[in-house]
Amino acid sequence: MKDAIDKKHGFYFLRVGSNNDDFDLTLKIKMFVKGNIVETTEKSEKLYVYQYPEDKFPDDYKLTTFCNIRPLKGKKFCDFLVPTVYHDRTYVYIQKKLPASKRWWKSKVHLLFKLL
């Protein structure tokens, strides 16, 4: 995991990934920031936005999304870009961890049966 905040230009950047080709991973990412927009390399994942009460925490949000690491398909990381000048913390959780060869084998068997 690598992250950085650019206060001058107003962006928080996060990259999560794996250098291990043995496992397919599904990661859950929670970011606590001032802002409710995320640009990401994950096109099929939803973004869940929770706004904290305005009277206690003005403009504070918890942004939750997911990242799928698939090393056999060449996908080893996910990038996230949040337009904000304030970043409190980020949590990354492993949701699923499957052997990459097992997932690859299932997709090839499924494709074989489709062709028959």
Image (cartoon, helix red, strand yellow):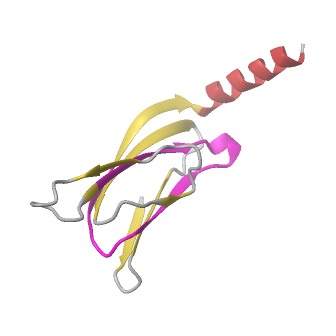
Q: Is residue 21 above or below residue 5?
A: above
Q: Position of residue 80 (x, y in %)?
A: 47, 60
Residue at 38% across / 78% down in the picture?
A: 10
For the image, the number of numbered tags is: 0
> The N terminus lies in which quarter of the figure?
bottom left
Q: Is residue 60 above or below residue 43?
A: below
Residue 15 in the figure: left or right of residue 24? left
Q: Residue furthest bottom?
A: 8
Image quadrant where residue 90 sits: bottom left
Q: Residue furthest left?
A: 56
Q: For the stretch drawn in magenta, what is the main secondary structure?
A: strand
Q: Nearer the viewer, residue 22 or 64?
A: 64
Image quadrant where residue 31 sits: bottom left
- Per the rendered image, the range of residues in magenta is 62-91
Residue 97 in the figure: left or right of residue 112? left
Residue at 42% across / 61% down in the picture?
A: 37
User: Does the stretch in magenta take in 13?
Assistant: no
Residue at 24% across / 65% down in the picture?
A: 59
Residue 79 in the figure: left or right of residue 70? left
Q: Nearer the viewer, residue 108 or 44?
A: 44
Q: Position of residue 69 (x, y in %)?
A: 55, 44
Residue at 50% across / 38% down in the picture?
A: 25
> The C terminus lies in which quarter of the figure?
top right
Q: Nearer the viewer, residue 64 or 116?
A: 64
Q: Position of residue 24 (x, y in %)?
A: 55, 36
Q: Position of residue 62 (x, y in %)?
A: 29, 53
Residue 95 in the figure: left or right of residue 52? right
Q: Residue furthest right?
A: 116
